[in-house]
Image (cartoon, helix red, strand yellow):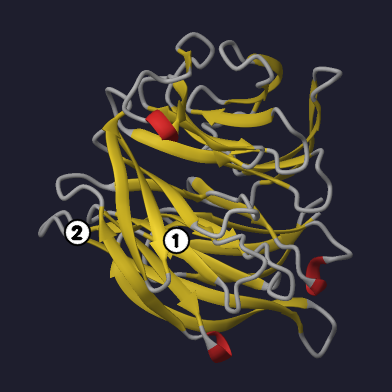
Amino acid sequence: MPFVHDQRVLALNADCVACCPNEGHGDLLAAGTYQLNTSTGIRSGLLYTYSLQCDQDGEQALHDLDTIDLPGIFEIKWDPDPSAATPSLALALTNGTTALVRIREEGKAGVTWQVEVDETALTTCVDFQTDSACPDRFLCVSTSAGFLATLKVEGSRAMMLEKWSAHDLEIWACAFVCWQRDLVFSGADDACLKAWDIRAAKAAPVIVNRREHGAGVCCIRPSREKEHVLCTGSYDEQIRIWDTRMVSHPVVTAKAATGGGVWRVNWHPLDSDLLLAACMHNGCSVFRADAAAGLLEAVAHHDGHGSLAYGADWFCGEAARDHHMVASCSFYDNLLHAWSY
């Protein structure tokens, strides 16, 4: 039975969370908000940062670090670079830009750079290329106008390398594959899963699957521990595990019903068979995957959110080492939870 250790009611609608994966910073949590003022049309956001620590009674608790004003935040991703001196995270923002925020001493957050991707659309997702052998840092970014873009990070600035029309409708998800540094997957409201070789991004996609998803593809998460394993979530209330060894024809090896549209999925940082899903109307669920056996079994469910569960991620710091600790958020009730099961 999931147990809520701590919670916050945020000032705006809560739509994304991300726990820092870097060694020595696994207690860091970022939460993003996005709220539309229907009178003015202005989309506002706040970025919150927290540290998960044991309090005087030995209980897990969130400690507030910083809050900064931004445009509406659609997605946040920590830079997984283990050599980085200070943690940083990329943000997909509703004003059509992508920004990098660095966490400085005492947990204070500050914007390092901001790049315009699409002045007429929202940026909806962002992901880091995770090739540790490559000295350069690259990002992929998606937009609500159906475009994908790649950015190159150079110190305290970034530049857009390529931008191309990838889908006919809003793209909700994009993800690099750590095993193939030039491969980017994308998923959109057109229910289509695609993959692109960014060395020739404006050419035809190397993978196109229009048949498997019954509605929009909301999230894509390749496994960082198991090569050729990929997870997708969809508005069709299904979570799917894919085998991508056949590049031209990836195969679904397991899928499970979630009871709600799957907005986000994340693999456990220590147990490569555990998947966490934010299932919108049906809270958050944890699944155990056995792709080889074609099994995907629900092992825990958190129904403590009273609104759409849009964000969920695993803590991996010292405070969470003996527990399956999760951060999750829900939209209209502005709730942020830290819980375990």
Which residue is more in the foreground, 185 or 306? 185
Which is more foreground, mark 1 or mark 2? 1
Q: Is residue 319 above or below residue 198?
A: below
Q: Which of disc 2 and disc 1 is earlier in sequence?
A: 2
Residue 214, can we see it? yes
What percent of the width, then of the height, locates residue 82?
67, 66
What percent of the width, then of the height, locates residue 198?
43, 35
What percent of the width, then of the height, locates residue 267?
71, 44
Q: Residue furthest right?
A: 322
Residue 280, can we see it? no
Q: Which residue is mark 1?
A: 90
Is residue 8 toward the left or the right of residue 114 in the image?
Answer: right
Q: Quadrant of residue 148?
A: top left
Label 1 and label 2: CA atoms lie apart by 24 Å
Q: Which amino acid, mark 1?
A: Ala
Residue shown at 31%/27% (left/top)?
Answer: 202
Mark 2, other Cα within 10 Å: few <14 / some 14–19 / many ≥20: few
Q: Quadrant of residue 21?
A: bottom right
Q: Is residue 57 above or below residue 266?
A: below
Which residue is more in the foreground, 82 or 294? 82
Q: Are marks 1 and 2 in contact (CB under 8 Å)?
A: no
Which residue is more in the foreground, 303 or 230? 230
Q: Quadrant of residue 166?
A: top left
Is residue 63 toward the left or the right of residue 43 in the image?
Answer: right
Q: Which residue is mark 2?
A: 37
What percent of the width, then of the height, locates residue 272?
81, 42
